[in-house]
Amino acid sequence: MTATVGLDRDTLDMMLASLDEFVAEALPDERRLELDHEDVCPEDTIRAMCGEDLGVQLVFIPEEYGGLGGGAFDSYRVCERLARVDIGIATSVFATFLGTDPILVGATPEQRKEWLGRVAEQGILFAYGATEPEAGSDLGAMKTTATPVETNGQVTAYRLTGRKQWISNGSIADVYSVLALAPGGPSWFVVEKGTAGFATAPPEDKHGIRLSNTAALFLDDVLVPAENLVGREEGRGLVQAQQVFGYTRVMVGAFGLGGGWEALDRAIAYSQTRVQGGAPLSAKQGFTHKLIVPHAVRLEAARAFLEETATRIDAGEGVGGALNTEGAIAKYLATEAGNAAAEGAIQAHGGYGYTRPYLVEKIKRDVRITIIYEGTSEILEMTIARDRWQQHLKTSGAYYRDAARSLDGVGEDCGGPTAALALECLAAVMEACRVGRLTRNQHILLRLGELVAYAECAAALARRAAAAAAGALPDKADRRFKPGALAAVSRVFAREAAHKVAEDGLRWVAGASTGADLAAALPLDRVRAAQTGLLADMNLVADALYGREAGSS
Ligand SMILES: Cc1cc2nc3c(=O)[nH]c(=O)nc-3n(C[C@H](O)[C@H](O)[C@H](O)COP(=O)(O)OP(=O)(O)OC[C@H]3O[C@@H](n4cnc5c(N)ncnc54)[C@H](O)[C@@H]3O)c2cc1C
């Protein structure tokens, strides 16, 4: 598969290289540690990144409005690289992207020209104001209102009143996209900084991403011209927000990958020099196979799904939010894996990991936000499960059996048959839930969401390993692992997915049901037999991570 829109590979590589250069100069480790400690958002640096010095925001703006016209794949690569530096800085850049999203999908051509043009030319910072104190996951509960102001029977303006909570760039943005309830329903309005009645609270004192500015917004009868109603039509706000979830969640998923890999790479480097028990930690299997390898494997499973989804978005499949479930799966696994990897990296550093100078404890606090914002993990589990549950019902259970068969051409070497086994087990678990009517328990529904993510990511990783073996990865794909090592990564994850779907599925079905016999329907012997060779493959992955053999990363 190749991406059909976006930057060419040279331009993307150039942007990534410029980003690295900029960061090395402007945000060395010591400065980031200090800013984190002092709880300071480096606004000048963020403005320099989004201005003439670097112009990173141009990646997200279409060419017709003065941007570079990057696609989802480019955004994923840039977001991962930004997150490796600092997830707070990445959040600030992302807030401009998010703030302009309703404009990109729902604005009139004149509105797009004005606001996207200003982002491209002037590097203005946007904020995205959706969340309220009592409306987080459930935006439908929002209370901010937009009251029309009429002149000679025409609506010429709106008065916005309400409060927004946890808004990234809240006190530093130049322009705000604000979701408010107009008579026709939730609608986006563009509010300029400095408008009378508009104020921001002092920045929040946060657990992590302390380089990112997060603040509440207060709107007290803020008069906004009717031209600032996005799309000039009331009631389109939630649809406009939902249309881009596939894309935006891929981007936050990339933050999980960046944070997780940055922490792991620090742990890998540390373990090569830290000698305990007469040898470096990197030589201790009990260390690598618990604290490093499983995290690397899960991050790469998430990457496979993320790259597939980004490629499909760039091919035009995501229109109207058609890939929102895929975006949810990508974000869910990538951010959960990133968060767990950072936790593993602290443990890998022992007592040193628990102190500030090694940075892994900062990364851990930073990456933690990615499983909360842009859809909490629990909301994503629900989104994923609801959609795939419908697919299961609509196809009379064929959905995952067909998905398993679609892996027929993907060989054992790349984990294909074991990933197929995970999908086959998922079909059986879902069917047991249908027969026992178990999804009436919300917990069961959400656990299905997790199992779906594991099984579908195993399939994506097996396809990616096969593509790598055939020399057919997308042009702009990450190439950290050589094909042989990636195949081992895939085999390890496929085993984990098959085991998890079968054993967790059994547990939850038994825990909730009145006796549906799932054990008889599951190919448990094959799931257990598929675990053969697991340790040898984990050894291969460890060797690749530590550059110890020909298939090294
Ligand atoms: C640092 C930071 C930056 C942010 N930036 C922005 C921004 O720029 N713009 C913006 O609009 N928002 C932003 N947010 C808000 C963020 O998106 C919300 O915090 C998030 O959506 C969760 O909403 P909430 O905090 O109200 O939690 P709640 O929705 O109250 O959730 C609390 C807990 O309950 C769970 N839960 C919620 N509903 C259900 C349910 N139906 N069933 C089961 N469990 C449920 C959640 O998963 C979570 O674990 C930011 C937040 C933070 C902390």
Image (tube, rainbow, N blue to C red):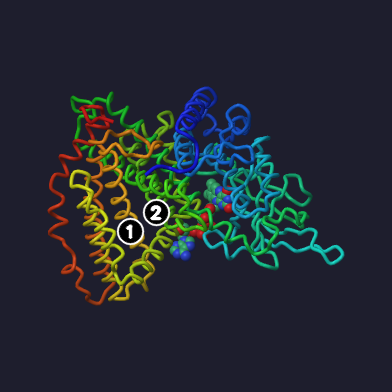
Give whichever of 477, 216 is nearer the camera.
477
Q: Closest to the observer: 468 or 51?
A: 468
Residue 274 visible in the picture: yes
Task: Determine the CA span between mark 2 and mark 1.
Answer: 8 Å
Secondary structure under tag 2 reads helix
- Residue at 33% in and 63% down: 448
**Residue 217: numbered disc:** none
Q: Secondary structure at mark 1?
A: helix
Q: Earlier in the sequence, mark 2 or mark 1?
A: 2
Instruction: Give the vertical position of 365 relative to 445 (above or below).
Output: above
Say what amino acid the circle numbered 2 marks. Ile
- Residue at point 33% right, 58% down? 452
**Amino acid, disc 1:** Val
Residue 274, relative to residue 445: is it above or below? above
In the picture, measured across the screen, residue 241 lies left or right of residue 409, that is: right
Instruction: Name the quadrant containing residue 288.
Output: top left
Q: Position of residue 233 (x, y in %)?
A: 68, 61
Q: Quadrant of the C terminus?
A: top left
Picture quadrant of residue 451: bottom left
Confirm or reject: label 2 Cβ below 8 Å from ligand 1.
no
Circle number at residue 452? 1
Q: Is residue 370 toward the left or the right of residue 281 in the image? A: right
The residue shown at (66%, 38%) is: 124
Q: As rendered, which of 299 and 143 lies closer to the eye?
A: 299
Are circles 2 and 1 on residues that touch, CB within 8 Å? yes
Q: Decide if residue 166 is in sight here.
A: no
Residue 340 in the image: state x and y as whole percent.
35, 45
- Give residue 117's position: percent from left, percent from top: 67, 40
Whole-percent x and y of residue 410? 23, 48
Number of marks drawn: 2
Instruction: Classify mark 1: residues with Cα within 10 Å, few (<14), some (14-19) or many (20+).
Output: many
Residue 329, numbered circle:
2
